[in-house]
């Protein structure tokens, strides 16, 4: 479609956006999303940049650190994941880390400039009461450091989201990965609707939802549109949307997938920014393969958050020094920690 036909964000909105806020919408149709997504890329980036500048301070970048607090032997069979017990990736399984070790790593990340510390555990969900109590202590300790706390713990059972909220958790990560039609080709041990149920539970407890996807799984552009449509019609919008490029890992079913086109990554980021103007859009896994120029275009298109550090769970990532150098070249500075989370109950649709 042409830029002038865009449902809400034509390029002519640039001047208006510079002196007014952008009101989030939750009534997008899938056709709206497709029309935005399929615009010429530079028009799309231009519009997204205007909306981004209308909502967020220019030049701020949220710096997040991610640690695997329990690694490997996961019962789920996600085709991209090195930690699945169903696959044969060369990783060393590790039991749940001690609270003191996690907090020491969080302190190191803070010293490097990170303001959000994210913890991920490779299991279907926190079923061991003692392990869950340790995670709660980790959350409390991270908040005591003056950092935002995020956790990715799989499916939450009744009451767990409320306890995480009481401990001070800012955000709960539970990625949807791809659109619902393609999802059964990614994993067989749980369903798309089960993912939505956990998102609904976290949001209902007043925790900010962190939910995004992965491109490069073999999905079609329509699958990407479907995922973005579901995210953009959640009430409230996710506080964070990670946009990941598949990192193929030997020993997983998706090890042979071709590299993601960086322009596809930028297209998804720009569309997410237009659909969810106040959401943190995180340039996440796969960044190690992006040139500085591709990253700069992603930031222009609306990405305002990154995972930094030498490792993302089990895969390599750009290091602290590399990121600081790039931020200096681009005139970006770390965003201070923020502590507020949505407190209204979720009204996420029950089905898809």
Image (cartoon, rainbow, N blue to C red):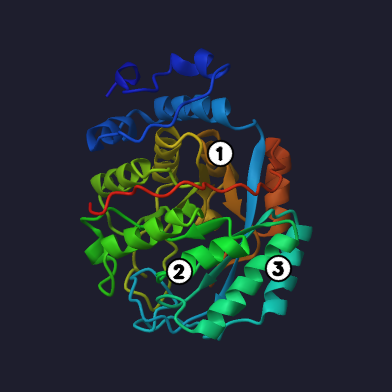
86 relative position to 328: left or right: left
Of residue 153 and residue 285, the one placed in the foreground of this image is 153
Q: Which quadrant of the view contains residue 78? A: bottom left
Q: Residue furthest left?
A: 181
Q: Are marks 3 and 2 in contact (CB under 8 Å)?
A: no
Of residue 65 and residue 336, the one placed in the foreground of this image is 336
Q: Are marks 2 and 1 in contact (CB under 8 Å)?
A: no
Q: Name the residue located 54 percent from the left edge and 56 percent from the top edge.
A: 171
Label at residue 95: none
Distance in Å between CA atoms under marks 3 and 1 = 31 Å
Q: Position of residue 214 (x, y in %)?
A: 39, 56
- Can you identify the residue that label 2 sits on? 159
Distance in Å between CA atoms under marks 2 and 1 = 38 Å
Few, some or many residues within 10 Å of mark 2 (<14, 14–19, 20+): few
Q: Looking at the image, is mark 3 or mark 2 earlier in the sequence? A: 3
Q: Position of residue 321 (x, y in %)?
A: 73, 55
Residue 111, above or below 95 = above
Q: Name the residue located 45 percent from the left edge and 16 percent from the top edge.
A: 13
- Can you identify the residue that label 1 sits on? 299
Residue 66, above or below 265 = below
Q: Name the residue located 58 percent from the left edge and 63 percent from the top edge.
A: 166
Distance in Å between CA atoms under marks 3 and 2 = 21 Å
Label at residue 141: 3
Q: Quadrant of the N terminus?
A: top left
Few, some or many residues within 10 Å of mark 1 (<14, 14–19, 20+): many
Q: Residue furthest right?
A: 111
Q: Looking at the image, is mark 2 or mark 1 earlier in the sequence? A: 2
Element type at marker 3? helix
């Amino acid at each position: 479609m042409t830029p002038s036909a865009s449902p809400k964000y034509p390029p002519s909105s640039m001047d208006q956006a510079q002196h007014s806020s952008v009101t989030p919408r939750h009534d997008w149709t899938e056709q709206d999303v497709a029309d935005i997504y399929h615009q010429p890329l530079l028009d799309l980036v231009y519009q997204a940049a205007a909306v981004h500048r209308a909502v967020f301070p220019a030049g701020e970048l949220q710096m997040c650190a991610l640690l695997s607090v329990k690694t490997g032997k996961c019962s789920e069979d996600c085709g991209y994941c090195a930690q699945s017990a169903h696959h044969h990736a060369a990783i060393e399984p590790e039991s749940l880390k001690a609270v003191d070790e996690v907090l020491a790593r969080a302190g190191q990340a803070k010293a490097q400039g990170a303001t959000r510390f994210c913890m991920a555990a490779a299991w279907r969900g926190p079923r061991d009461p003692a392990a869950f109590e340790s995670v709660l202590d980790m959350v409390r300790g991270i908040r005591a450091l003056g950092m935002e706390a995020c956790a990715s713990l799989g499916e939450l059972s009744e009451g767990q989201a409320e306890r995480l909220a009481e401990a001070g958790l800012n955000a709960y990560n539970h990625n949807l990965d791809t659109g619902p039609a393609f999802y059964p080709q990614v994993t067989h041990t749980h369903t798309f609707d089960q993912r939505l149920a956990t998102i609904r539970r976290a949001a209902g407890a007043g925790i900010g939802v962190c939910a995004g996807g992965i491109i490069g799984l073999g999905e079609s552009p329509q699958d990407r549109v479907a995922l973005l449509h579901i995210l953009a019609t959640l009430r409230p919008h996710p506080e964070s949307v990670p946009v990941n490029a598949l990192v193929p890992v030997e020993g997983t079913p998706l090890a042979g997938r071709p590299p993601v086109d960086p322009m596809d990554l930028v297209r998804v980021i720009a569309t997410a920014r237009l659909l969810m103007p106040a959401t943190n859009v995180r340039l996440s896994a796969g960044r190690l393969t992006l040139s500085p120029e591709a990253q700069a275009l992603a930031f222009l298109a609306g990405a305002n958050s990154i995972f930094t550090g030498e490792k993302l769970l089990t895969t390599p990532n750009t290091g602290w020094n590399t990121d600081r150098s790039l931020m200096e070249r681009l005139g970006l500075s770390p965003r201070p920690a923020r502590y507020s989370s949505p407190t209204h109950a979720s009204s996420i649709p029950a089905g898809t």
